[in-house]
Image: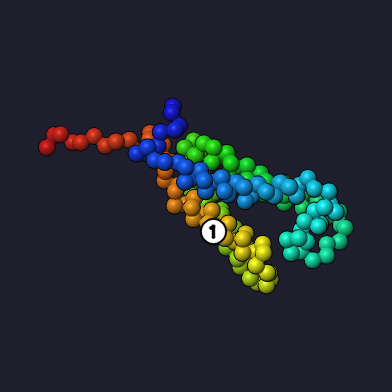
């Protein structure tokens, strides 16, 4: 089965771009899984965190969250690589970005966070999610929407 042919030969580049962008947004979290704790603390403080105590549970949670977010990024990368094959999950990934953007917006505003990285995170999620949902239909495989034969009996 040819998984590169889409309905009406749609251009997959915009969809792949939004999926790839989202893969980077999530995937950058992998960095936190491998940094030594003191370096991770400096990086988090550079993003606006206050003093972070040396605590084994905080270290563990950083690795857990970084690993999970990195794996989500890998999923977006996989779908960007073969969007027709994984067309069924693309709208879910778009909604995931929008919902994450909403969570960040609500809680960032509630906590009174400064614009960096709060605005960038929210914007990335909303832009990625809207872009994915707007272009998701380009990945519909041709076999999923066969041409309709005209009824010549009338």
In what quadrant of the picture does the N terminus appear? Answer: top left
Q: Is residue 103 visible?
A: no
Neighbour tally class for label 1: few under 14, some 14-19, many 20 plus, Cα within 10 Å: many
Q: Position of residue 71 (x, y in %)?
A: 66, 44
The mark total stands at 1
**Residue 10 falls left or right of residue 93:** left
Q: Which residue is nearer to you in this view: 100 or 114?
A: 114
Position in image of residue 73 (x %, y %): 63, 45
Question: Of 151 and 59, which appears nearest the observer?
Answer: 59
Which element carries disc 1, helix, strand or loop? helix
Q: Which residue does the image show at 11% across and 37% down from the upper left?
A: 154
Q: Quadrant of residue 123?
A: bottom right
- Indicate whether 75 appears above or below 119: above
111 relative to 53 in the view: left or right? left
Q: Is residue 4 above or below residue 129?
A: above
Residue 138 is situated, as x and y percent measured from the top left of the image, at: 42, 43
The furthest residue to the top: 1
Q: Is residue 90 shown above or below 153?
A: below
Task: Please tell me which residue is depicted at 47% across the width and 46% down the height of the picture.
Answer: 14
Q: Residue furthest left?
A: 154
Q: Nearer the viewer, residue 38 or 98?
A: 38
Q: Estimate the x, y position of residue 110 in percent, counting from the top left.
A: 65, 72
Residue, x 60% and y 46% (percent of image)? Answer: 23
Residue shown at the point (63%, 70%) measured from the top left: 109
Residue under numbered circle 1? 126
- Where on the picture, by quarter, is residue 102? bottom right
Left or right, residue 50 beside residue 21: right
Let me know if residue 121 appears in the view: yes
């Amino acid at each position: 089965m040819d998984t590169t042919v889409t309905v009406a030969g749609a251009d997959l580049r915009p969809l792949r771009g939004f999926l790839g962008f989202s893969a980077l947004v999530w995937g950058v979290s992998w960095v936190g899984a491998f940094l030594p704790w003191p370096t991770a603390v400096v990086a988090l403080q550079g993003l606006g965190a206050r003093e972070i105590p040396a605590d084994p549970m905080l270290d563990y949670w950083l690795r857990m969250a970084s690993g999970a977010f990195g794996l989500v990024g890998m999923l977006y990368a996989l779908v960007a690589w073969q969007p027709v094959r994984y067309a069924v999950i693309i709208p879910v990934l778009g909604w995931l970005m929008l919902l994450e953007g909403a969570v960040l917006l609500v809680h960032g505003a509630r906590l009174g966070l400064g614009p960096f990285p709060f605005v960038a995170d929210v914007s990335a999620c909303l832009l990625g999610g809207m872009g994915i949902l707007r272009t998701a239909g380009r990945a519909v495989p041709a076999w999923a929407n066969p041409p309709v034969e005209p009824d010549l009996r009338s």
